[in-house]
Image (cartoon, rainbow, N blue to C red):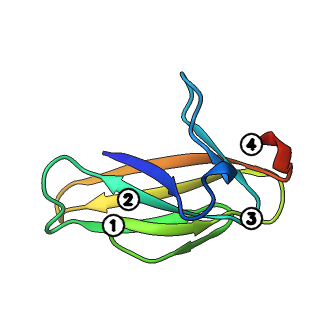
Amino acid sequence: MLASAASSGSSDLIKQPALGTKEWTIFQSREVFITCEVGGSADGLDFEWDCDLGQVSGSGRTISWEAPSGACYAHVTVTVTNGETTEEGSVRFRVSTCGTCF
């Protein structure tokens, strides 16, 4: 299972992880869509999303997350269950207040 992010707006305000890292960089207060990729069909799976900072909106395989308004590190986590098995994945973000960092 893999959770991946994609920009909902100006792509110059989010940077994919550098080679060898798993940390995305996003500008403060920006929204990003995050999708949980699962092997096989997503039928019958329940997705529960949570974050330590910022705001999660939506449900299912793809949600939106709004970054907090200040510099920080934030995690968005998804827990997937099929009634018998539970798996968890997460995406780590470095929230930047510096527009020239992009």
Q: Residue at x 57, y 66 (%)?
A: 65
Nearest to N terminus: mark 3 or mark 1 = 1
Which residue in the protein does label 3 denote? 68
**Mark 3 near mark 1, Cβ–Cβ under 8 Å?**
no
Query: Is 80 rendered above or below residue 48?
Result: above
Crowd around label 3: few <14 · some 14–19 · many ≥20 (10 Å): many
Which residue in the protein does label 2 denote? 79
Nearest to N terminus: mark 4 or mark 3 = 3
Front: mark 2 or 3: 3
Nearest to N terminus: mark 2 or mark 3 = 3
Can you tell which mark lies on residue 47?
Answer: 1
> Hey, what amino acid is under mark 4?
Phe
How far across and down, in percent of the image, does residue 32 sit?
56, 62
How far across and down, in percent of the image, does residue 14 sit?
64, 49
Nearest to N terminus: mark 1 or mark 2 = 1
> Hey, what amino acid is under mark 1?
Phe
> Hey, what amino acid is under mark 3?
Pro
Cα separation between marks 2 and 3:
22 Å
> Hey, what amino acid is under mark 2?
Thr
Query: Is 21 rendered above or below residue 73?
Result: above
Cα separation between marks 4 and 2:
31 Å
